Amino acid sequence: MDKDEKIQKLEEENNKLKEQLNKYLLKNKTYYENHKEEQKQRVKEYKEKTNYKSNYKPTPEQRREYNKREYLKRKEKIKNENEEKTINKTFIIINS
């Protein structure tokens, strides 16, 4: 009976939290639906004010740097995976 009571209590709590979440989400959703044009206008003004450019292209120097960083991370990841494999192999051999 104790387990059943706990399960029942947790299900009730879960349902209560779901209801609260739905109320919160619905509230935010309706706000943005009602103020959609205002939001679009704010974003447009911000982009103009900050000279935001959506067609950003990194310079060749930046691209080389990004690629180098990615290569080093990938290399380190492979190295770590290999180390783990050797550790696991030695652990299996020792325990056998």
Image (cartoon, helix red, strand yellow):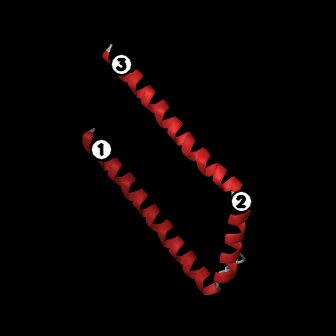
Badge 3 or badge 1: first in the primary sequence: 3
68 lies above or below 74: below
**Quadrant holding the C terminus:** top left
Residue at the image point whose x is 69% and y is 59% from the top = 35
> Which residue is identified by label 1?
93
Task: Label 2, secondary structure: give it.
Answer: helix
Label 3 packing within 10 angstroms: few (<14), some (14-19), many (20+): few
Badge 2 or badge 1: first in the primary sequence: 2
Task: Label 1, secondary structure: give it.
Answer: helix
Residue 51, horizontal then vertical, whole percent: 67, 83
Q: How many marks?
A: 3
- Looking at the image, residue 25 sits to the left or right of residue 1; the answer is right
Task: Label 3, secondary structure: give it.
Answer: helix
Marks 3,1: beta carbons within 8 A: no
> Which residue is identified by label 3?
5
Task: Judge depth for marks 2 and 1 and give the one in front.
Answer: 2
85 lies above or below 78: above
Q: Which mark is residue 38?
A: none
70 lies above or below 87: below
Q: CA distance from mark 2 to mark 3?
A: 46 Å
Label 1 packing within 10 angstroms: few (<14), some (14-19), many (20+): few
Residue at the image point whose x is 55% and y is 81% from the top = 65
